[in-house]
Image (cartoon, helix red, strand yellow):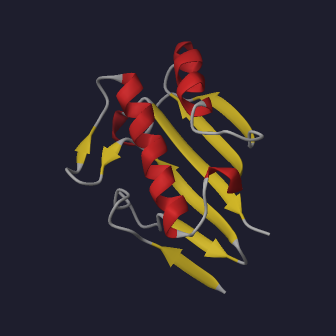
């Protein structure tokens, strides 16, 4: 059974899509950008803060689905500038303490709201 995950402590979608879909113990999350859900403020002028906000938004979605970082199977990272790879990679890695999920990182010409990074993910429980 498909269930839409929509929570207050993750940013509301900026278009016609769900924050995440839970289906058969699998969580498919839309791309997360650095919108602070408490203030609705977009963080784009400090890359470290931006990446941490994205990861906190992901954490909120995981928590809503009764999952955690260990349940993340795959991530897709979209960067505006691949020169930021090392900083983004270091912050991203700090959120995991077990084996890392599968992942790709790609540079794109433009992201929603002109952010510097967007991350989507798939998580699952046995």
Q: Identify which residue is drawn at 42% across, 71% down.
A: 6
Residue 17 located left or right of residue 22: left
> The C terminus appears in which quarter of the rendering?
bottom right
Say left or right for 112 vs 67.
Answer: left
Find residue 80 and report its horizontal and vertical position in percent.
49, 26
- In this view, which residue lies farthest toward the front? 97
Which residue is located at x 56 percent, y 69 percent?
A: 65
Residue 49 visible, this orientation: yes
How many labels were placed on the picture?
0
Q: Residue furthest top?
A: 83
From the viewer's side, name the closer residue of 72 and 19.
72
Residue 92 x %, y %: 57, 32
In the rendered image of this protein, does residue 59 appear above or below residue 18?
above
x, y (%) of residue 67?
61, 63
Describe residue 122's horizontal placement relative to residue 18 as left or right.
Answer: right
Residue 35 vs residue 99, the one in the foreground: 99
Figure quadrant of residue 101: top right
Answer whether residue 82 is visible to the viewer in this image. no
Q: Name above or below for residue 66 compared with residue 98.
A: below
Question: Where residue 53 appears, x then y in whole percent?
Answer: 39, 40
């Amino acid at each position: 059974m498909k269930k839409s995950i929509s929570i207050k402590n993750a940013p509301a979608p900026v278009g016609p899509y769900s924050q995440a879909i839970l289906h058969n113990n699998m969580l498919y999350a839309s791309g997360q950008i650095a919108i602070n859900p408490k203030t609705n403020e977009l963080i784009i002028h400090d890359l470290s803060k931006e990446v941490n906000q994205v990861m906190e938004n992901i954490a909120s979605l995981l928590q809503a689905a009764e999952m955690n970082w260990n349940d993340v199977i795959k991530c897709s990272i979209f960067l505006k500038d691949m020169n930021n790879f090392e900083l983004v990679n270091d912050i991203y890695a700090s959120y995991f303490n077990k084996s890392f999920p599968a992942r790709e990182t790609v540079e794109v010409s433009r992201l929603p709201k002109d952010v510097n990074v967007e991350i989507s993910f798939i998580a699952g429980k046995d």
